[in-house]
């Protein structure tokens, strides 16, 4: 695992999508076969002995990572989506963003009571998004094992929101 190589494939875009945000663009990493392969392998390693039943991916870049990890773990793939996208019975959870708020949804039947769940997203910043996903999974009865992120923005202290769960990240900035 060549962490510096993987980090070199993260492109930083200033002032996107709004002024003051340093956006971590993961598309160069996804496009590079070695970097994509190593990233998926690294994320999968976090959970390989955890008997995970379901991997939850967070809309939208989380899906790109979570589905590959779910495949390798031989687990089911669950999607947590932005409000208004899921067609079936669902519950909603609202969380704060740097400006304003956002809502995420999960299908009520996507996780069975007691199933072992790993949550995956591309970036851990304030942790508000992943915290909303944790609440959704708990509310449908899932047993959260741990959370995994490709990128952790350490200065934002997002991991402090998850005292009860293990938080793994591959690339720390
Ligand atoms: P947060 O809820 O603050 O932890 O933000 C995490 C969510 O917002 C993830 O779904 C990320 O895709 C996105 N995000 C937040 N900050 C950034 C950033 N600097 N670069 C790229 N994506 C980000």
Image: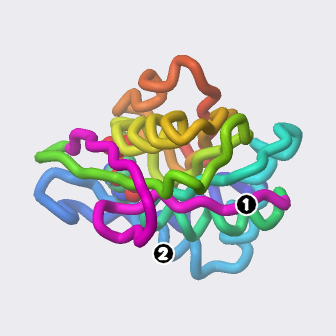
The structure residue drawn at horizontal position 18% and vertical position 46%, both measured from the top left corner, is 101
Quadrant occupied by the N terminus? bottom right
The structure residue drawn at horizontal position 82% and vertical position 63%, both measured from the top left corner, is 72
Q: Determine the secondary structure under disc 2.
A: helix
x and y percentages locating residue 133 in the rendered image? 46, 44
- Measure the C-alpha gap from mark 1 to mark 2: 25 Å
Q: Earlier in the sequence, mark 1 or mark 2?
A: 2
- Inspect the magenta stretch and tell me whether residue 162 lies in it: no
Left/right of residue 152 with respect to residue 110 in the rendered view: left
Q: Residues within 10 Å of mark 2 (few under 14, many from 20)?
A: few
Number of the label disc, if any, that sits on residue 41: none
x and y percentages locating residue 166 in the rendered image? 64, 28
Left/right of residue 57 with respect to residue 143 in the rendered view: left
Number of the label disc, if any, that sits on residue 76: 1
The structure residue drawn at horizontal position 80% and vertical position 48%, both measured from the top left corner, is 45
The residue nearer to you, when weighing 116 against 152, is 116
Number of the label disc, if any, that sits on residue 27: 2
Left/right of residue 52 with respect to residue 56 in the rendered view: right
Above or below residue 129? Residue 69 is: below
Task: Please give the range of residues in magenta.
Answer: 74-97
Contact between marks 1 and 2 (CB within 8 A): the answer is no
The colour scheme used here is rainbow
Of badges 1 and 2, nearer the viewer stands 1
Above or below residue 161? Residue 113 is: below
x and y percentages locating residue 98 in the rendered image? 18, 43
Q: Determine the secondary structure under disc 1.
A: strand
Q: Residues within 10 Å of mark 1 (few under 14, many from 20)?
A: some
The residue nearer to you, when weighing 25 against 118, is 118
């Amino acid at each position: 695992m060549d962490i510096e190589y993987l980090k070199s494939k993260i492109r930083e875009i200033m002032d996107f999508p709004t002024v003051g945000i340093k956006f971590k663009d993961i598309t160069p990493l996804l496009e590079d076969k070695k970097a994509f392969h190593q990233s998926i392998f690294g994320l999968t390693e976090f959970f390989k002995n955890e008997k995970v039943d379901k991997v939850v991916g967070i809309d939208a870049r989380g899906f790109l990572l979570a589905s590959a990890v779910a495949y390798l773990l031989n687990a089911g793939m669950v999607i947590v989506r932005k409000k208004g996208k899921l067609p079936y019975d669902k519950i909603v959870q609202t969380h704060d963003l740097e400006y304003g708020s956002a809502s995420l949804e999960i299908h009520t039947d996507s996780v069975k009571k007691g199933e072992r769940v790993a949550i995956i997203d591309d970036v851990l910043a304030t942790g508000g998004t992943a915290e909303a996903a944790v609440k959704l999974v708990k509310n449908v009865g899932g047993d959260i094992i741990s959370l995994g992120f490709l990128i952790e923005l350490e200065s934002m202290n997002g991991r402090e929101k998850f005292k009860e769960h293990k938080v793994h990240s591959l690339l720390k900035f």
